[in-house]
Amino acid sequence: MENNRIDYTTYHLPELEQDCWDRLVTGAVKSRTPFHTPSIATLHQGEVNLRTVVLRKTLATERELRFHTDIRSPKWQELSQNPSISALFYDAVDRIQLRVKGKAVLHHTNEITAEAWQKTSLSSRKCYLTRFSPSSYTDVSTSGLTDDIEHENFTLAESESGYSNFGIVSIQVQSIDWLWLNHAGHRRAFFDYEKGSFQWMIP
Ligand SMILES: Cc1cc2nc3c(=O)[nH]c(=O)nc-3n(C[C@H](O)[C@H](O)[C@H](O)COP(=O)(O)O)c2cc1C
């Protein structure tokens, strides 16, 4: 395994930056890859909140990452008040960590959400069909779905009501902090799109 690993010691910064985006693109399209489920951090009233999401789309040229969520969820409310966002990725096989920072742009009932909603399967639409808001407290253990919805005993047309809860968070990437763990010596680089600079760092 160790011998098959990529040797980043010969890489230059531009090709390394391209490698980051290639991995992010793969993470969005292949569910069994490590970058498919990043941790997302938001800041709300001085408190940090973290959660796992599914990376749904990577637009490398636009430096944009997207994930889907329910607009009734706390993270949506938090991001509408403070768009600062961070996404953490780790590939345990290639031993690469990406710390992505950016600003969130929230999409709701627009062209971007309409296109994505159309491609959202019946089972994924269930997430947007809970009667009460995600993260609200209940007296009993429940999915928040009716029995029919839970057992997918509903039509695509009936699932349309979930669209009003469906939101897309787009992360406009401002920087990527890349770290590679290597037994002979780690490597680290910082890609700052705000300043337009690529830098090596001491790991
Ligand atoms: C593997 C995995 C993938 C998840 N994907 C998403 C997702 O794409 N969107 C989402 O809103 N929540 C997703 N969740 C649930 C969130 O981690 C979180 O529990 C929920 O959205 C509530 O977050 P909030 O209270 O910060 O709004 C996922 C959880 C796991 C474990």
Image (cartoon, grey):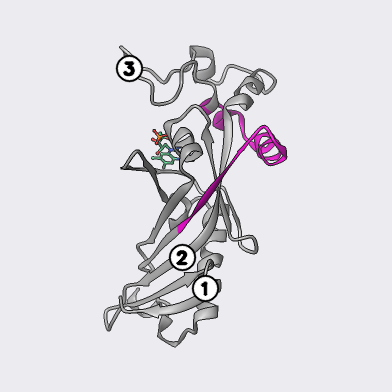
Nearer the observer: mark 3 or 2; the answer is 2
Quadrant location of the N terminus in the rendered image: bottom left
Type of amino acid under label 1: Glu
**Residue 106 magenta-drawn?**
yes
For mark 3, give the secondary structure.
Answer: loop
Q: CA distance from mark 1 to mark 3?
A: 45 Å
Horizontal side of residue 57 vs 127, given as left or right: right
Q: Nearer the viewer, residue 165 or 34?
A: 165
Report whether residue 50 is seen: yes
Q: Which residue is mark 1?
A: 17
| Disc 2 within 8 angstroms of ligand 1 (CB) | no
**Nearer mark to the viewer, of 1 and 3:** 1
Q: Which residues are magenta?
A: 101-127
For ligand 1, give the image quadrant: top left
Q: How far is disc 3 from disc 2 in space, using C-alphas?
A: 40 Å
| Mark 1 in CB contact with mark 2 (< 8 angstroms) | yes
Q: Nearer the viewer, residue 92 or 67?
A: 67
Which residue is denoted by mark 2 in the rendering?
176
Indicate the amino acid at tag 3.
Answer: Ser
Mark 1 residue element: helix
Q: Does the magenta-highlighted stretch encompass residue 159?
A: no
Residue located 49% across and 69% down the image: 192
Which of the marked residues, 3 or 2, is nearer the chain's N terminus? 3
Instruction: Say if 8 sits above or below 151 in the image.
Output: below
Q: What residue sits right under mark 3 in the picture?
A: 141
Q: Position of residue 153 (x, y in %)?
A: 58, 17
For marks 1 and 2 on the same chain, the one whose residue lies earlier in the sequence: 1
